Image: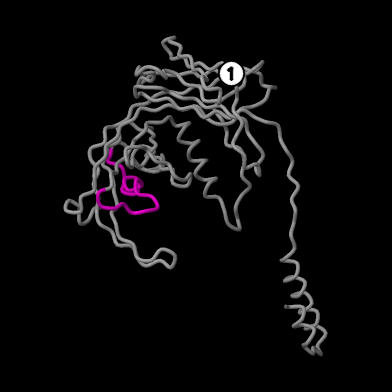
Amino acid sequence: MMKNFLQHVKVRNTAVNMLCAAACFFFISCEDVIDLETQTGPEQMVVDGWITNEAGPQTIKLTWSANYFNNNAPKPVLNAEVTVTDNLGKTFEFEDADANGTYIWGASNADTLGQIGRTYTLKIRNGAEMYSAVTEIKRVPAVDSVVYRNEKLPFEPDKGPREGFVAQFYARDFAGSGDTYWIKPYVGGKAVVDKAVNISIAYDAAFGSGAATDGLIFILPLRESITTDSLYSAGASVGVELHSITNETFEYLNQIREQASNGGLFATPITNIRSNVINANPDGPKALGFFGASAISRKETVIDPAKARPDDD
């Protein structure tokens, strides 16, 4: 269209001719398709392991990494030997009974693996390679209450007017700086992490170590982070699941959130996030993923419009 237009315009000025030609080149070149050739790197073991202080089975999932443009389900790591040992010397063996890369401890009992204050070492033997990671279960405060208020959001072109309830929780950080937490919405009887950009983490009662919030009630944005992209409806079962995490886990989750929100014109190239799973052979293949642990406290409620709070600050 731009090219045809230029053909029918009588331009007498040479400088204008050059400008129009440059503009023509710009618009035409913007339609070019560029095929990027991406290299295929070696497969790496990805560890998705998390243990808690709650009774019941604990799971560590092992898969193989794949190319960025590979949309197939990740391949499982099979026939690995997976154990977790606490600092008192007790060892827990994880088995992949279904041969799908999901290694489970306590599948047939209601025993408890994790204990607050103990350190846990994960060991994975896969062929000739031995990997390990260390974490700790930290203390977690009790959740005092979950409250909610009615909210009317402004009209949005793609969503229209919206009305519903914003939920928030109340809990107090322990005295003594350095406690870190992962805050998860608890909806319909289960914890929900719908998007990486919505990961809510706290250092003491605020976002980071620079705030003087040690020992205080969690700040409002953190309390309301259990309401993410949508408002809740009357009758919904909502709440919070508060996980204690180590400072290392806090940094890992923060990097995930930052990379998930990394976009736009000035986005930086994404990279693999540093794993705490280390190969005993420094020259061997590295692992991806993370091994973490937490103590959990939770509270939930059912939204009753008659009990909604008119305002919270």
Position of 175 with respect to 83 (left or right) is left
* Residue 311 screen position, x and y as percent: 22, 56
Which colouring convention does the figure follow?
one colour
Q: Which residue is drawn at 34% across and 24% down?
A: 54
Q: Which of 288 and 161 is in front in this view?
A: 161
Q: Nearer the viewer, residue 241 or 86?
A: 241
Helix, strand or loop at disc 1?
Answer: loop
Find the residue positioned furthest to the top: 89
User: How dense is the environment of label 1, judged by Cα within 10 Å: few (below 14), some, or many (20 and up)?
Assistant: some
Q: Quadrant of residue 213?
A: top left
- The residue to which callout 1 is attached is 80
Can you see residue 260?
Answer: yes
Mark 1: which amino acid? Ala
Position of 78 with respect to 18 (left or right) is left
Find the residue positioned furthest to the left: 306
Q: Residue at x 28, y 39 (%)?
A: 216
Q: Give the range drawn in magenta.
A: 216-235
* Residue 146 screen position, x and y as percent: 25, 43
- Is 232 one of the magenta-colored residues? yes
- Is 98 one of the magenta-colored residues? no
* Residue 180 screen position, x and y as percent: 39, 34
